[in-house]
Amino acid sequence: MEQDKLDDLFRNIIQENQEDLNEAELNSKESVWDRLDIHKKGSPFPFWKIAAALLFLIFSGAMIFNSYNRQQEKNRYIQLETELRQTKAALLATEAQLSDSKEALQKSTSSIVKSVEVDSKEKAPSRYTTIERVVTIHDTLWIEKAQKVNEVVKLVTDTVFIEVPTTAPSQWVNETSKEEKAIAIDEEIKEIKKKRTPSKVEFVFGKKPLPKRSIKINSFSKEGELARKKDNNLITIPFNN
Amino acid sequence: MNEKELIKKCSQMDLRAQRAFYDLYYKDVFRLARRYLSDYHETEDVVVTVFNKALKNITHFEYRGKGSLKKWLNTIAINESIKSLKKIRPITYMEEVPENIPLQTSNVRIDIEIIHKILNTMPVGYRTVFNLYAIDQYSHSEIAETLNISRNTSKSQMLKARKYILHQLNKKKLYGTG
């Protein structure tokens, strides 16, 4: 058999093999059909995927921002340190310069002092010596207004006593009612006023300076009250009321 | 429903037409893929891919007479089978061939089951080239292009595949020098 005939034989057997599907092929047929994309429904909108992506972006952004800030801060510290070193170096240089200048100044000062000392030794002593004295200079005058308190003396008299001597009626002693006594006294006073009106009343005021800040007026003392003195039958009438 | 109508309705995403298309070509596609792939599940996966691609791209298919649809579908199936083969393991093209095999016979008793058994036991390189050349009638140039090998490799693999088949037939006493 030629080689091509073998090929044809195989091809013909395969192509002519139109036998029905065997059991395995039949089972596969339905499972394969179910797996086809045409049965797939449109997937719902992937909210969770978008949310996850957003979260990822936010976290990534935050991380990058944080890292950037850290780097910036680090750079700033490095820069500050460098500046500090430079400043320190400059200060040290200035200090060295100053110490050199100081040394030079000390040398020149000592030479001047030496020359002055030599000069003072060579010179003769003088007649005059200089002393220090204190000179006070007054050069300012103030005029200011001050309040002066003038003392004023005032005399104040506020009480007049009128004493009228009289004889108490005999029945007063025996009377028991105070009202009756009062009425009787009133009537008695009226009669006395009618009969014995004094022709002259003299007011005698004594002049006496009052002590400062110690004036007390006891106008409502016991002495000023209307009182009856039974023993000597005198009536005292307050004048200032 | 003729092929033209079937294509038109499949383009319109008519599920009944798609099922009819599937029923019509499932057996051919499955058996073609099975010839290339020894594994049953691999074959199923390839069939799924083939029908997905076909139903998706059927709108771009140009009908060129009776049988053109089947040919187009077979091309997709062959390409997908080879892609699957390459994806799983690289195809090796064996050089050793059984010696002293007579190449002539007069009493051949071969059926489809024996062919399937021989193809299943055949090295992948031999089987692929034999399928492409002997069964699906690709030229050596087309095989070389499809498998990314040289024409000579394709030829030598074909020769070795034939020798292998004869050897297997001889072993089964189905083939003799009579």
Image (cartoon, rainbow, N blue to C red):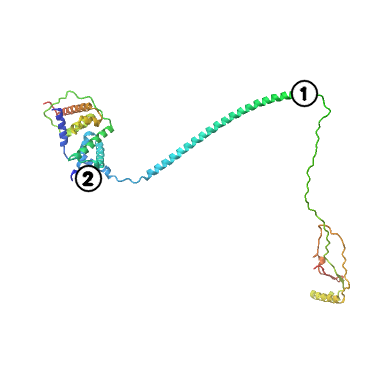
Residue receiving disc 2: B8
Tell me residue B67's x, y (percent).
18, 39
Give the chain of mark 2.
Answer: B
Give the chain of mark 1.
Answer: A
Tell me residue A69's x, y (percent).
49, 37
Judge whether B136 appears above or below A144 on screen.
above
Q: Is residue B30 visible?
A: no
Q: For the C terminus of chain B, give its image quadrant.
A: top left
Image-based side of A189 in relation to A61, left or right? right
Residue at the (79%, 22%) spot, across then down: A122
Between B13 and B123, the one lying in front of the other is B13
Judge whether B25 appears above or below A231 on screen.
above
Amino acid type assigned to the residue bearing label 1 in the image = Asp
Q: Could you tell me which secondary element the residue under label 1 belongs to?
A: helix
Residue B23's disc number: none
Residue A119's disc number: 1
Residue at the (24%, 31%) spot, across then down: B145
Tell me residue B156's x, y (percent).
21, 26
Between A206 and B105, the one lying in front of the other is A206
> How many numbered marks, from 0 up?
2
Tell me residue B99's x, y (percent).
18, 23
Between A114 and A183, the one lying in front of the other is A114
Q: Are marks 1 and 2 in contact (CB under 8 Å)?
A: no
Residues marked 1 and 2, same chain: no
Amino acid type assigned to the residue bearing label 2 in the image = Lys
